[in-house]
Image (tube, coloured by chain):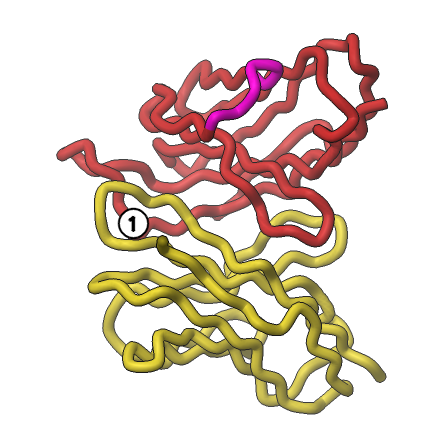
Chain colours: A red, B yellow
Amino acid sequence: DTEVTQTPKHLVMGMTNKKSLKCEQHMGHRAMYWYKQKAKKPPELMFVYSYEKLSINESVPSRFSPECPNSSLLNLHLHALQPEDSALYLCASSQGPGLAGGQIPQETQYFGPGTRLLVL
Amino acid sequence: AQSVTQLDSQVPVFEEAPVELRCNYSSSVSVYLFWYVQYPNQGLQLLLKYLSGSTLVKGINGFEAEFNKSQTSFHLRKPSVHISDTAEYFCAVTYGGATNKLIFGTGTLLAVQP
């Protein structure tokens, strides 16, 4: 089973709202990712969590706040977003780093179906 | 800088015809290659991957790809396409080192016509 689930499927929010996106996987993976994808573009990496700790932040604005409450769950908290933040938000997971701690470039990332966000 | 190039933004093809989607990467000693497919309004699904070993890799839905180190290419092929293959196809690479950060190409829209 290589399933990553994301909720909600669609989200419409105003610029003053606070909302959260949720991602879940039960494959025992220890690395989880958030990507942002604009129309007709490839996904852009936002954050990487490894063993529930933030390991990569690709200079994402603070209005996006990730959280990894446990090894199966990844949240993305949204606050005071701008219309240009409207996009498809994808979650992914992979097996995670080995005992030595380094990440494994051969790892396969498995993606969820995404949350389509519209900011008005 | 490490990069992935998909020169064709769109490839129109008739149903049951063969297709090749091109992918080139910047050279590196160790490289790991992936093809993902994205159907309309969906997430990315892994089609196939090359990590090591045989340079011809078979994936799901009848797709295959060949790793060519001398030409730094990883082209995706299918001998006979179906309407249901219409989707965006992304080539992606990770490089040996301390990170598993995926570097994506810009994508190729495969448009299968009846």
Name the spot of residue B20 as percent of width and height, x first: 57, 82
SS category of the residue bearing label 1: loop
Kind of residue indicated by mark 1: Pro
Name the spot of residue A65 as percent of width and height, x first: 55, 15
Q: Is residue A74 visible?
A: yes
Q: Residue at x 32, y 61 (%)?
A: B32
Does B60 sit left or right of A21 as displayed? left
Give the labeled residue for mark 1. A105
Q: Is residue B56 above or below residue A115?
A: below
Q: Residue at x 38, y 44 (%)?
A: B101
Q: Is residue A105 above or below residue A84?
A: below
Q: Is residue B86 magenta?
A: no
Q: Dot 1 falls on which chain?
A: A
Quarter of the picture containing the C terminus of chain B is bottom right
Does A25 sit left or right of B37 as displayed? left
In terms of depth relative to the viewer, which is nearer, B69 or B57?
B69
Name the spot of residue B65 as percent of width and height, x first: 45, 77
Q: Is residue A1 visible?
A: no
Q: Residues within 10 Å of mark 1 (few under 14, many from 20)?
A: many
Secondary structure mainly formed by the magenta segment: loop
Q: Residue at x 56, y 14 (%)?
A: A62
The image quadrant that residue A119 belongs to is: top right
Q: Is residue A66 above or below residue B63?
A: above
Residue lying furthest left = A100
Q: Is residue B41 above or below residue A57?
A: below
Region of the chain picked out in magenta, as a range: A59-64
Name the spot of residue A83 as percent of width and height, x first: 78, 26
